[in-house]
Amino acid sequence: MNWKKWGEPQAYLFILPAFIPYLIFWLAPMIYIVYLSFTDWDFMNPVKNWVGFENYINLIQEPAFAKALKITFLFAIGNVLPTLVGGLLLALLLNRKMRGSALYRAIIFSPWVTPTVAVSIVWAWIYEPRVGLANAILKLFGMGGLEWTQSPDTALMSVLIVTIWKGIGWTMVFYLVALQNIPESLHEAAMMEGANRRQRFWHVTLPLISPTTFFLFMITTIDAIQAYDQINVLTQGGPSGSTTTLLYLYYDAAFRQFNIGQASTVSISLVMLLALISLISMYVSRRRIHYL
């Protein structure tokens, strides 16, 4: 074998500690999931009957899949934009020299380090239509109460509020670091050129924090697509499937209907969606580097 083409064989020994867990905990299970997607296994019967592409055909023709895909995209869009914009605004506010800013940062960041299940349980009480805090606040302003998680019209919005509230502190921390890494001399030079605060923000601050924005956009999008805990605690995918995302559809098929073949097909579609987002991310990132 021509080792010059593949590099020094001893070098492969250094990647084994990382490759073995990757092989055992990701690649091998992924191959097994692909195999299960071509079977009708019910999680109980030891026999796995080969059904070919039947699961994929059924999934494409299933209205619940199209609805879950739509809800997944709506949830991702509804989560990403407010989380990034809110995190940036908070970072701009707390980046100033103000009294108690460290305490405010800790308070805003604390939901991120709190388990999602615990947060969701608290919000489930807040959303309670009769005695919950949310409707009590609305009534103080003379507004009627909402059904929140109990209505198909407001359930997705309710889950989004929890998700945004939990993640906004995380994006704030990243933006704070990015803002603090901007050389002050650039702002001073812009001021000497006559740029006002708004012009400095658009032409100095935003371009220099764009790598952070791009990173947060991709990570927040992937996290939104993989959201499960808050949906399971608050709505269980309902009412009427209004909060059933692809990941929750997988859970329902696997652990409620015990249709592992169909669930495996849903999981593969989810992996393909995440892979597509990652490829777009890499493409845009390379184009940006080439442009710079």
Image (cartoon, helix red, strand yellow):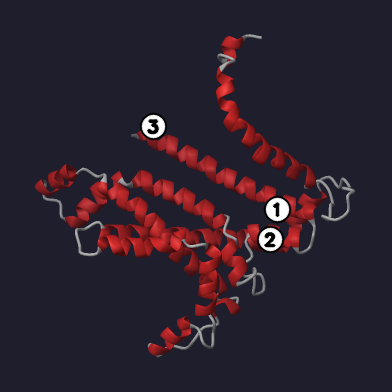
Residue 266's label in the rendered image is 1
Residue 161's label in the rendered image is none
* Mark toward the viewer: 3 or 2: 2
Quarter of the image that includes the N terminus: top right
- At horizontal 69% and vertical 47% (from top left) the residue drawn is 268
Amino acid type of the residue tagged 1 in the rendering: Val
Q: Specify which label sits upstream in the sequence, 3 or 1.
A: 1
Structural distance between the alpha carbons of marks 3 and 1: 36 Å
User: Which image quadrant for residue 207?
Assistant: top left
Amino acid type of the residue tagged 2 in the rendering: Leu
Q: Which residue is mark 3?
A: 290
Q: Which residue is mark 2?
A: 249
Task: Answer whether residue 29 is visible to the viewer in this image.
Answer: yes
Is residue 149 positioned above or below 80 on the image? below
Q: Specify which label sits upstream in the sequence, 3 or 2.
A: 2
Q: Specify which label sits upstream in the sequence, 2 or 1.
A: 2
Residue 55: horizontal and vertical position, in percent? Answer: 79, 52
In the image, 195 versus 278, the foreground residue is 278
Residue 170: horizontal and vertical position, in percent? Answer: 41, 56
* Mark toward the viewer: 3 or 1: 1
Structural distance between the alpha carbons of marks 3 and 2: 40 Å
Residue 214: horizontal and vertical position, in percent? Answer: 41, 47
